[in-house]
Image (cartoon, rainbow, N blue to C red):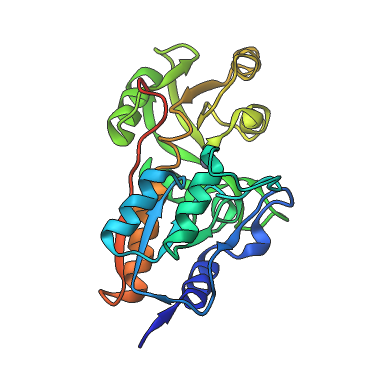
Amino acid sequence: MKYQVRDVCRIMEELAPLELAFEWDNVGLQIGDPDQEVSGVLLTLSVTIESVQKAIAGGADLIIAHHPVIFKPLPHIRTDTPEGSLLTAILKHDLAVYVAHTNLDQAEQGLNQWLARDLGLREQRVLAPVDNGTVGLGRIGTVAPVKLRTFAQQIEDLWNCSVRLVGDPEQEITTVAVLGGSGGDFVQKARESGADVLVTGDVSYHDAMDARSLGLAVLDAGHFATEQIVVKELGRYLAERWGDRIRILEDHGASPFASE
Ligand SMILES: [Zn+2]
């Protein structure tokens, strides 16, 4: 059986329904023809010229990304701009691009669930649920009592990153909130929910000050390290559905921060 782009969209939307995306977001099929046949997909966090080249070299006709390749309305597609030349390369090579962003963040079995499982959280629930349900942003749960410093080191090893720490490194923590990507806005929510520590990325100076005044520890592992799991887990999900009928390439890319 030949797979078409529309079949991949359907399988992706069984995991991450489009209606779970935030209003301001832009998700779903962003470039390409739903009727186009798919023989290979490339999974990536963000679409870059390197990921486009990897897709072409590996025989993938569809790129599945976490971050939208088209987000704001485009004033133009000029090949003398990075965005314009990226879109031109995609179109010239008949590549399709599908995006699962905040709908994958909020999905019951999505980014935040994968992070919680990776951290071994027990008795977990959604940190910021939609309609008190099983979908929503972040997860909160418990770990065996551990020093904050040790927990930070475990995360550095697990996600191959360096962690910025807010709080007393010697304190013992058991209740952990985790939220992939930019989680600085969830300091208050994590504290109210009983977390000892919030594990997230993109924490600003002011978020860190708020956390300290609330007595909440924060481990900032960076945006990249707290979302990179998407590539591996989407690969696993799609392979379960397809077996070896469609080639799956994983582009693990790199954080733009050389020291992250
Ligand atoms: Zn992100």
Determine the image quadrant of residue 133: bottom right
Residue 257: image location, x then y, percent = 41, 24
Quarter the N terminus occupies: bottom left
Q: Quadrant of residue 203?
A: top right
| Rendering quarter of residue 115 | top left
Residue extending farthest bottom: 1
Q: In the shown orientation, is residue 197 left or right of residue 192?
A: left
- Residue 199: image x %, image y %? 48, 31
Residue drawn where x is 59% and y is 62% of the image: 28
Residue toward you, 142 or 256? 256
Given residues 212 and 144, the one toward you in this image is 212
The residue depicted at 54 percent of the width and 59 percent of the height is 108
Quadrant of the snapshot with the C terminus:
top left
- Number of dots carrying numbers: 0
Residue 85 appears in the picture as rendered: yes
Q: Residue at x 54, y 57 (%)?
A: 99
Residue visible at 57% across and 49% down?
A: 68
Q: Position of residue 86 (x, y in %)?
A: 49, 47
Residue 201: image x %, image y %?
A: 51, 30
Q: Is 246 left, or right, of 207 in this rendering?
A: left
38 relative position to 7: left or right? left
Q: Is residue 19 above or below residue 11?
A: above
Q: Does the rendering let one see residue 109?
A: no
Q: Is residue 213 above or below residue 84?
A: above
Q: Nearer the viewer, residue 43 or 241?
A: 43
| Vertical placement of residue 18 versus 137, above or below | below
